Image (spheres, grey):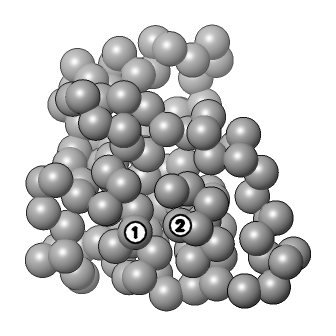
Amino acid sequence: MKEEEKSIIPDEIISNKIYLIRNQKVMIDRDLADLYQVETKRLKESVKRNSERFPEDFMFELTKEEFENLRSQFATSSWGGTRYLPSVFTEQGVAMLSSVLNSDRAIAVNIKNY
């Protein structure tokens, strides 16, 4: 991988997008979509097409309470009017997502993330 690809995502950006939910370090689908530079909808479609690759210990949907608790941690709400509860990905889920999306950007995010 080229040196400039390794430096496209500062460490602080990644670490600020990791949350502790259900005693697991996770990243939220929309944050991953932003990092991978794809629409959240496209990310979710890729996961759905490859659902057998994402068991509960790789990815899970937040409960309404978990989502509200997470939203309350942000001073301003940039969540807008989401229709669906977000999915979150564990370390293994992020790695699997990188392989499912199969892009240079996804690989760079995975390498920086863990």
- Please provide percent x and percent y for residue 15: 60, 39
Q: What SS does tag 1 mark? A: helix
Q: Quadrant of residue 96?
A: bottom left
Which sits in the foreground, 31 or 84? 31
Relative placement, left or right, of 70 versus 104 is left
- Please provide percent x and percent y for residue 47: 29, 72
Residue 16 visible in the current orientation: yes
- Please provide percent x and percent y for residue 95: 40, 69
Alpha carbons under labels 1 and 2: distance apart: 6 Å
CB under 8 Å between discs 1 and 2: yes
Residue identified by numbered label 2: 110
Question: Could you tell me which quadrant the N terminus lies in?
Answer: bottom right
- Residue visible at 36% across and 55% down? 91
Which mark is drawn over residue 95? 1
- Residue visible at 80% across and 65% down? 8
Relative placement, left or right, of 79 versus 105 is left
- Residue visible at 46% across and 12% down? 72
Which sits in the foreground, 75 or 107? 107
Which mark is drawn over residue 9? none
The disc, 1 or 2, on the residue closer to the chain's N-terminal end is 1
Residue 103, placed above or below residue 51: below
Report the label total: 2
**Amino acid marked by disc 2:** Asn
